[in-house]
Image (cartoon, rainbow, N blue to C red):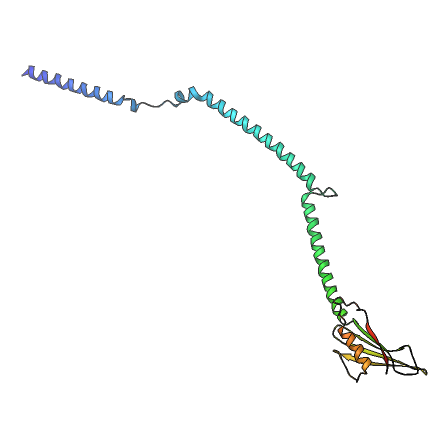
């Protein structure tokens, strides 16, 4: 009995030792070992630092080159846009804008003046018609005349001059829209017709008189 118990005890101890051995082996597997970052980075650290230094140096050189190009372009732009008094581009643009506004104001004023002058010009004498004639047999030279003066709308008057040996008489008759408020003689009617047929100037200028001479009545 004692011998059997002793063998069982030894077997138990052997089993316990095998278990501890397996646990120890499992705990020391490569997957469970800690990673040494310093050991991984140290071989390539110098290369990384050198690469970063070169990159920074290249970026600094590029920045210097870009700064020089920007300064060169700015000098050229200032030379092209500098005004006669050495002003900057902003000053030149502001001056041009002020000139544009001033021209626009002057143009508005000129348009208003032109409208006033055009309205006044349409009421000015623009059409002229004249007929020379001899109303008396004892006088010669067609020294009598009928003169019609009208504006663009046919408003004006007819002026008649009758010359004789004893004197000269002058008559005036108003014209409204091409019609007289009194009876017109043949010479006055012809003078008015010539005036109304004369081209009216759009600018209010006077047209050349149209006329003719007639014989004695």
Q: Is residue 53 above or below residue 212?
A: above
Q: Residue furthest right?
A: 166
Q: Is residue 23 above or below residue 203?
A: above
Q: Is residue 48 above or below residue 115?
A: above
User: Horizontal and vertical percent for residue 210?
Assistant: 81, 72
Q: Residue furthest bottom?
A: 183
Q: Is residue 57 above or below residue 200?
A: above
User: Horizontal and vertical percent for residue 45?
Assistant: 45, 22
> Residue shown at 78%/79% (left/top)?
175
Q: Residue furthest top?
A: 3
Q: Left or right: where does residue 8 sit relative to residue 163? A: left
> Residue shown at 48%/23% (left/top)?
49
Looking at the picture, tell me which residue is in the foreground, 112 or 136: 136
Numbered disc total: 0
Q: Left or right: where does residue 159 sit relative to residue 47? A: right
> Residue shown at 65%/34% (left/top)?
72
Looking at the picture, tell me which residue is in the foreground, 205 or 166: 166
Q: Quadrant of the N terminus?
A: top left
Q: Quadrant of residue 127?
A: bottom right
Q: Quadrant of the C terminus?
A: bottom right
Looking at the picture, tell me which residue is in the foreground, 76 or 210: 210
Q: Quadrant of residue 5?
A: top left
User: Horizontal and vertical percent for residue 89?
Assistant: 67, 44
Q: Quadrant of residue 108?
A: bottom right
């Amino acid at each position: 009995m004692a011998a059997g118990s002793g063998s069982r005890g030894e077997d138990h101890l052997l089993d316990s030792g095998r278990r501890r051995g397996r646990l120890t082996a499992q705990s020391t597997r490569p997957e469970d070992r800690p990673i040494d970052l310093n050991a991984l980075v140290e071989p390539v650290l110098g290369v990384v630092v050198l690469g970063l230094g070169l990159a920074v140096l290249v970026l600094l050189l590029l920045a210097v080159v870009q700064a020089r190009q920007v300064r060169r372009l700015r000098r050229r732009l200032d030379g092209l846009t500098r005004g006669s008094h050495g002003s900057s581009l902003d000053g030149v643009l502001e001056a041009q804008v002020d000139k544009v506004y001033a021209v626009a104001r002057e143009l508005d004023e000129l348009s208003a003046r032109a409208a006033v002058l055009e309205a006044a010009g349409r009421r000015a004498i623009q059409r002229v018609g004249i007929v020379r004639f001899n109303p008396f047999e004892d006088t010669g030279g067609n020294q009598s005349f009928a003169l019609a003066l009208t504006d663009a709308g046919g408003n004006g008057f007819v002026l008649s001059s009758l010359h004789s040996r004893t004197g000269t008489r002058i008559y005036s008759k108003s014209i409204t829209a091409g019609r007289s408020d009194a009876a017109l003689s043949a010479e006055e009617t012809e003078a008015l017709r010539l005036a109304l047929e004369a081209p009216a100037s759009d600018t209010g200028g006077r047209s050349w008189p149209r006329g003719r001479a007639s014989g004695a009545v």
